[in-house]
Amino acid sequence: MTTQTTRATETEPLVPSFDAPESQGRKLAIICSKGNLDMAYPGLILANAALGEGVETHLFFTFWGFDMINKKTSGDLKFTMLGNTATHLPQGLGGIPGMTHLATSQMKKAIADLDVPEVPEFLDQIVASGGHLWACRMSADMQHLGEEDLRDDVEGIISASDFIELTEGAQLLFI
């Protein structure tokens, strides 16, 4: 009897072996569409994990996710309780002056306590590990932003079609 978890057929493993030859050439495409502090980290953490496993990784920043790569906003992302029922606190608290600042400060401290870098440093780490950063053409046009407004390591402002072509065959995550 084997201890390996298997599918109903008892021949295929349930968990893939990422070091197997057939796993070579894997790609991950992450679409980052949110610019809040709490929504920035899931994409960055997944990108970092993928790069650590040797997966070619591309991040596409669109709509409010542009705040993550905008030189003026990337170091000042906020966390708000308003409209976020996952905080398990009364929604009225989020409207009190100073609550966004307090919630943001607490979240940044909790993240720092886990030894996770702030967003700009995390993006530096991802690029240094071989990750690719792309900006959405439509979002750039909507916000009247050009390459000079973005982090220097953004490889280009491209259309959604270009990103899909660039990441052909990739696993896709939308955050």
Image (cartoon, rainbow, N blue to C red):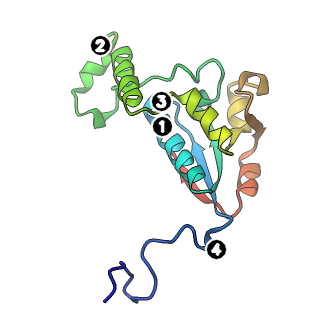
First in sequence, mark 3 or 4: give its number. Answer: 4
Question: SS for tag 2?
Answer: loop
Q: Do the residues labelled 3 and 4 touch (CB within 8 Å)?
A: no
Residue 119 in the image: x percent, y percent? Answer: 54, 29
Type of amino acid at the residue the image marks with label 4:
Pro
Q: In which quarter of the image is residue 74?
A: top right
Sequence order check: which comes first, mark 1 or mark 2?
A: 1
Q: Could you tell me how far apart the alpha carbons at marks 2 and 3 are, in whole angstroms? A: 19 Å
Where is mark 3, residue-wise?
36
Gap between marks 2 and 4 measured at Cα = 55 Å
Dividing the picture into quarters, in which one does residue 159 lie?
A: top right
Q: What secondary structure is marked by label 4?
A: helix
Distance from disc 1 to disc 3, alpha carbons, whole Å, reads 9 Å
**Is residue 133 rendered to the left or right of residue 6?**
right
Q: Name the residue under label 4.
A: 21
Q: Distance between the residues labelled 4 and 1?
A: 31 Å
The residue that disc 1 covers is: 41
The answer to whether mark 1 and mark 3 are in CB contact below 8 A is no
Q: Residue at the spot x=76%, y=42% of the render?
A: 158
Q: Earlier in the sequence, mark 4 or mark 1?
A: 4
Q: Amino acid under label 3?
A: Asn
Nearer the viewer's eye, disc 1 or disc 2? 1
For marks 3 and 4, give the CA distance: 38 Å
